[in-house]
Amino acid sequence: MTELKDIELELGRFRARLLAAVVFVLIGFGLLTARLVYLQVHKHEELATRADNNRIAVVPIVPNRGLIVDRNGIVLANNYSAFTLEITPSKADDLDATIDALAELVEIQPRDRKRFKRLVDESKSFESLPIRTKLTDEEVARFTAQRYRFPAVEIKARLFRNYPLGEVGSHLIGYIGRINPAEKEALEESEDQANYRGTDYIGKLGVEQSYERDLHGTTGFEEVETSAGGRAVRRLKSNPATPGNTLVMSIDIRLQAMIEKMFGDRRGALVALDPRNGEILAFVSKPTFDPNLFVDGIDVESWRELNESIDKPLLNRALRGTYPPGSTFKPFMAMAALNTGKRSATQTIYDGGTFQFGNHTFRSHGDGGLGPVDMTRSIVKSSNVYYYSLANEMGVDLMHDQLEPFGFGRRTGIDLQSEVTGLLPSTAWKRRAYKRPEQKKWYAGETISLGIGQGYNNFTMLQLASATATLVSGGERYRPRLVREIEDVVTRARRTVANDALQPLPLQPKHVQLLRRALYLVTQEGTSARIFMGANYQSGGKTGTAQAVGLRQNEKYNASKIEEHKRDHSLYIAFAPVDAPTVALAVVVENAGFGSDAAAPIARRVFDYLQLGLYPSEEDMALVRIGKAGAPVGTPRPAEMVPLPGATVILRTPNAGQQIVPLVLPEEPLADGTAADAAPLASANGARAAQ
């Protein structure tokens, strides 16, 4: 009996355990079923998307960067394709060993290693970084044969920016460079983030920087199916990239190259623009640099050479270099006097060679004076005494209020970044600029030298050229522009970049006519008469000689006893033709002496080019380069016949589309006076185009 009870008890326990196991299994299957229902039904779309993402990769297609051409269609910036050898640092077990092994297959120089190390420091470890660019076909073949040894290395075909004219126009064109961390962060926070996926390079300077959005284009994408190992299996969908637009500059690059050549090894700047619309015809800063150095990432030696040079080749002197205007300031002072009634055109001032103010003697040029001078003669003969006394009568604040509307002491608004304001002083400015009470006070003696463009006055050549254009055009003002049109790369439609007309200055026509005539007489019987002798057009101008360093009381200037970088600057402002100006310019040659020695001869050749289509003879060019030129010598050449090394143009045909081909010069005239078959690619005459 006891045994039966024990058996029943054991059976009961067994049934309980069996029931518990069944319940446990049912609960497990229930949970599994619920989970499957949750995943298959409720989470279906999300998980399907994740699966596709694991299977499908979206790869950005970086657009071709837009071209930059001058007003005549000569290409200033284009692109070419080349192979690069790239390493993904995160995939490399030993980065140095990987590079050493690669060096056995392709040439890797020390500067390549330094550049790569800098890129590694600046970039994320999972990014692919170039160790060598522009591989030869032989190098590509050698690496491909050994590809299995380098899981962290790959060859990519990339587009590279090219500046075919090298140093010509480098400051206005600018360059592109690899996006740095600060720029990447700014892009990630901007509305352009998606459009810059896959983009490694961005405009860093010049119009490459200021027109970045137009030049960059629209990034495309393609969806590719990938294997478990991440390799592309097949393309599923593709949306092509749209190349960047073409910038058509207002610059005549042949004129630009001519001016840069005339500067030679000297430092300085020149800006020439059209007073009728603000289009800039030449924008020169010397010395220049080769923007191609920056495309791959400039090496340390080249950077040190550029950055530490006493000549500062990276400084855009036309945009950021400020200079005392010297006597080129006098026509503007004369207009201020006429506007305020401080002087009439016929009022005479006796120029005895010096102007005494308190116990300080302000000297004029030379050892003697000019005698009685009215306003016209004060400009033609460049009387300092006339403008010393005028500045004393006007005072600094009235001078500031009258001259500031011409654009002195403020940005012009040109389509380049980093323009400086220059300095047109006033009592309010001095109170803001200095800290100590004795420094904040304006002293009457400080006003005197302002009248001849010295003292605190400091302006850029862009400001001076723009002000000259305003003066000779009767008060018409435009915002200066380097880009003339933007061409849509798809439709070929050209959009004119607005020539922003500013509120005209209320200058009286009789005053403008008086100053035009005075400036014209400067070229006939004044300080630039020998330079413009024999010109077949009428122009006006004003020389200027500005101190780079101050002189002590009663100290005479002697260039031969002063270091070259401390000598006077040579300046010239000019316009042509006199009656209806189509060009106004300002030029400075640093530490080159009198305005008539270095600056005015350059202006004469610019006008010969623009008004007559003439290019200086080699003999004449050599004299200009060393500051020994007067009127042109030798036989000038037609500007369109002078070679421009490296120049290419865009050729469009219905069948081949767009091609970039070498610039071909027109044929020489035949004996009967007709021209031989000229290539259809020849650029237009610079003189006609500028008109």
Image (spheres, grey):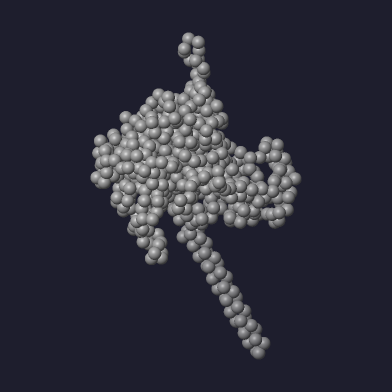
Asked whether, in this view, residue 582 is left or right of residue 213, the answer is left
Quadrant of the rendering where the N terminus is positioned: bottom right
Looking at the image, residue 12 sits to the left or right of residue 106; the answer is: left
| Rendering quarter of residue 371 | top left
Q: In the rendered view of the protein, which quadrant contains the C terminus?
A: top left
Front residue of 586/550: it is: 550
Residue found at the very far bottom of the displayed protein: 2
Residue drawn at x 66%, y 47% is 112
Of residues 479 and 152, the one nearer the viewer is 479
Residue 479 visible to the viewer: no
Whole-percent x, y for residue 583 in the image: 38, 33
Q: Is residue 654 above or below residue 549?
A: above
Question: What residue sits 38% from the left and 65% below the top?
Answer: 437
Please provide percent x and percent y for residue 218. 46, 43
Q: Position of residue 80 (x, y in %)?
A: 57, 36
Coordinates of residue 48 in the picture (x, y in percent): 51, 54
Q: Is residue 135 visible?
A: yes
